[in-house]
Image: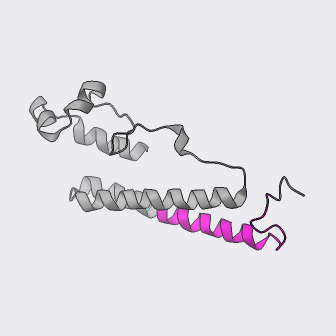
Amino acid sequence: MEMISAILYQLTRNLTPEQIKKSGFDAYFVDHTTGIYPIAASGMPFTATYFQSKGDIITDLVEDLAAEQKARTTYDNILRLTDDPDVRDPIKFLREREIVHFQRFGEGLRIAQDNLNSKNFYAFNPSFDK
């Protein structure tokens, strides 16, 4: 989030009023000037409800895997839309990081599944249900 915010700040800090209007950034500018306000491309503000946690190792690792893939797809889409190396280079770094996180969560899921016996595999949370 910090790197994306820094990129956005660098891209918007010296905009003229004419550039703000021409780019369609004017509605955002009215509410936030060029301050960083976490918001999706669709216009939906960030909310902590995006974080999911059930306290079950299988459920939570699968959720983590999905989150990493969604972030990677977002970075892929950004890379498709820009040719600015000052934007592309840090986005490529973030994309690579998502791939590594996905791999590590996948390894964690495999380890967790390998340590569940057939009686509790996907059936209940072994840390609570005995």
| In the image, residue 87 above or below residue 123 | above
Quadrant of the rendered structure where residue 103 is? bottom right
Tell me if residue 113 comes above or below residue 75 in the rendering. below
- On whether residue 115 falls in the magenta region, the answer is yes
Give how far across and how far down residue 63 sits, in percent.
59, 57
Q: Residue furthest right?
A: 130
Residue 34 drawn at (x, y percent): 27, 31
Q: Position of residue 130 (x, y in %)?
A: 90, 58
Q: Residue at x 79, y 57 (%)?
A: 125
Above or below 76: residue 45 = above
Question: Of residues 11 and 46, which is closer to you in this image?
Answer: 46
Image: magenta residue range: 98-125
109 magenta-colored: yes
On the image, the x and y values in percent for residue 9 come to 29, 38
Please count the marks in the image: 0
Q: Quick check: can you spot residue 93?
A: no
Is residue 128 found left or right of 73 in the rendered image? right
Residue occupying image coordinates x 35% and y 34% = 36
Identify the image quadrant of the N terminus.
Answer: top left
Closest to the observer, 89 or 129: 129
| Closer-to-camera residue (4/54) | 54
Direction from residue 98 to residue 109 in the image, left or right: right
Any part of residue 70 in sight: yes
Query: In the visual, does 7 lie left or right of 118?
Result: left
Image point (26%, 53%), residue name: 86
